Amino acid sequence: MLATFGLAPSALIAEGPRSLIRPQCVRSGVALSAEAGARKVLWEPKPEVMEQTAMRRFQHVVRGGRGVEGSYEELWKWSVENSDAFWTTLLDFVQIEYSGSTTPAKEGTLMPDVTYFPNVEVNFAENMLKHGAPGAPLADAEAVVSISEARDDVRWTFSELRDDSARVQAALYLLWSFPYQARRAC
C-alpha cells in the first residue's frame, strides 16, 4: 500500500509485526516487484529514529548469517525467496507463546490455500495477558479499545486487562465449583 502512494520503504517506521509485511501492490492490473523503479521519497525519518524500530531490530536478526544486508528491499526479497525461514524467524522475533512444532512452516504454495504453521497452537489470551505482568514493558500500554455510539469509549491497558481477566476467572471458578462443593457436603 505504501508503494501505491509513492512512499519509499525507508519511510516505513511503524512498530510491530504489521510493519514487517510488504503488501502486494497492483497498479493497472500489473503486479509491482522489488525491481520496480525507484519511488519518490516524500519523507524520511532521522537515522537514529529508524534504528529504534521493530523492523530495524528484525533486520539485524535476519542479517546474522542469512546473507541479508539489511535494506528493506533485501529483507523483502529474502522473505519471498525463503518464505519458510522468514516466517519461522518472525515467529521467534515477535515472541509469540505457542505449543507444537514449527515444521513445516507452511502447507500449500498458492494463496489462499496456504496454511502457516499447521502444527502450532496459539493461545490468544495467554499472548495478550503476558504483557500485563508486573514489570512487563507494555503493562501500561493500551491493549483493548472499545468504541460505541451508545456510550463513552472504554480503554484497557495490558495490566488492567490482566487484572480484569483474573477477576472473571476467579468468579467463574466460584460459580462452577460451588455446586460441586455443595453436592459433596450433603
Image (spheres, rainbow, N blue to C red):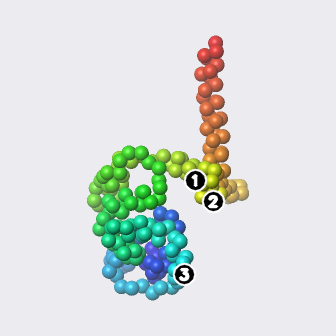
Residue at the extreme top of the image, as rendered = 186
| Residue 86 or residue 37, whichever sits in front | 86
Q: As shown in the figure, which amino acid type bears the numbered disc 3? A: Lys
Which residue: 32% across, 55% down? 106
Q: How crowded is mark 1: few (under 14 residues within 10 Å), some or many (20 or more)?
A: many
Which residue: 47% across, 85% down? 41
Q: As shown in the figure, which amino acid type bears the numbered disc 2? A: Ala
First in sequence: mark 3 or mark 1? 3
Which residue bears the numbered disc 3? 46
| Residue 148 or residue 91, whichever sits in front | 91
First in sequence: mark 1 or mark 2? 1
Q: Establish if 19 lies above or below 96.
A: below
Q: Nearer the viewer, mark 2 or mark 3?
A: 3
Q: Quadrant of residue 185?
A: top right
**Residue 170 horizontal/vertical position (percent):** 64, 36
Q: Residue 62 carries which label?
A: none
Spatial CA distance of label 3 from label 1 is 29 Å
Q: As shown in the figure, which amino acid type bears the numbered disc 1? A: His
Spatial CA distance of label 2 from label 3 is 25 Å
Q: Establish if 35 lies above or below 175.
A: below
Residue 29 visible, this orientation? no
Which residue: 37% across, 58% down? 88
Which residue bears the numbered disc 2? 141
Q: Establish if 172 lies above or below 5.
A: above
Q: Residues within 10 Å of mark 3 (few under 14, many from 20)?
A: few
Which residue bears the numbered disc 1? 131
